[in-house]
């Protein structure tokens, strides 16, 4: 999953949210030597979400639709596509408006600048200025996100062209997301509850 989904799936604990957000930028296993426990929990949640997603048959179905053209980048593209559907259907999943949620998250990340990896520190101002979390709701926002990722990959990926595939197979990808995401949300709820033992930190079940 991409940024918006990871942030949504973090629950209400701020440091878990920060850890989940930076998960892709933190390598290795010795997390406790580098981060405090709640941030570690967020990083571990990020990795658990990625494993659940990458091995799920519905997600594999989405990837298969793109694999012939984009090969191993299909998974990255599907992550962004799914953030598009979460963004565009946001009111079905969260009581707070997406605009307000995004501003809350941007402030949270800025407030925890001291623990952000350098790559995140460089990226975050662009994310805030472009309001990526809200812009995901538009196909143009998907195009911009994939173009940005493509520009950072060491090989030619053609990901910047994938928004056309989203438009061509829009209903199929939407069906995949709608079937998959509630399962992922329940997985994240159970993961957090098993570690927090605090049901009031759960994600909203709407």
Image: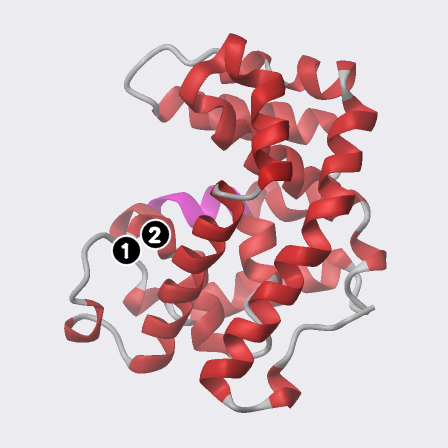
Q: CA distance from mark 2 to mark 1?
A: 6 Å
> Of 83 and 124, which appears nearest the observer?
83
Q: Is residue 178 left or right of residue 5?
A: right
Q: Quadrant of residue 141?
A: top right
Query: What residue is at 54 percent from the left and 28 percent from the top?
Result: 77
Dot 1 lies on which element? Answer: loop
Mark 1 Cα-neighbour bin, 10 Å: few <14, some 14–19, many ≥20? few
Residue 150, labelled with which disc?
Answer: none
Residue 66 percent coordinates (x, y) = 58, 17
Start-end of magenta stretch: 122-127
Q: Is residue 124 magenta?
A: yes
Residue 151 percent coordinates (x, y) = 40, 20
Q: Which residue is labeled 1 in the image?
A: 117
User: Can residue 2 be seen from the camera position used here?
Assistant: no
Query: What residue is at 64 percent from the left and 38 percent from the top?
Result: 58
Query: What residue is at 72 percent from the left and 57 percent from the top?
Result: 182
Q: Is residue 205 magenta?
A: no
Q: Is residue 99 above or below residue 152?
A: below
Residue 121, labelled with which disc?
Answer: 2
Q: Is residue 47 above or below residue 126?
A: below
Mark 2 Cα-neighbour bin, 10 Å: few <14, some 14–19, many ≥20? some
């Amino acid at each position: 999953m991409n940024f918006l989904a990871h942030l949504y799936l973090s629950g209400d604990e701020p440091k878990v949210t920060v850890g989940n957000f930076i998960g892709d930028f933190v390598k290795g296993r010795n997390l406790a030597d580098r981060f405090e426990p709640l941030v570690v929990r967020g990083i571990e949640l990020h990795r658990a979400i990625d494993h659940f997603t990458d091995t799920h048959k519905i997600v594999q179905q989405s990837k298969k639709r793109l694999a012939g053209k984009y090969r191993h980048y299909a998974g990255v593209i599907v992550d962004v596509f799914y953030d598009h559907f979460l963004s565009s259907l946001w009111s079905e999943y969260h009581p707070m408006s997406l605009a307000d949620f995004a501003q809350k998250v941007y402030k949270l990340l800025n407030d925890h600048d001291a623990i952000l990896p350098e790559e995140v520190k460089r990226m975050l101002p662009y994310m805030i200025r472009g309001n990526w979390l809200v812009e995901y709701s538009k196909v143009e926002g998907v195009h911009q996100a994939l173009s940005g990722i493509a520009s950072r990959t060491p090989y030619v990926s053609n990901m910047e062209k994938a928004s056309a595939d989203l438009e061509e197979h829009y209903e199929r990808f939407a069906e995949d997301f709608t079937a998959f995401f509630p399962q992922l949300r329940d997985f994240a709820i159970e993961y957090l509850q098993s570690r927090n033992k605090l049901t009031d930190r759960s994600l909203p079940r709407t």
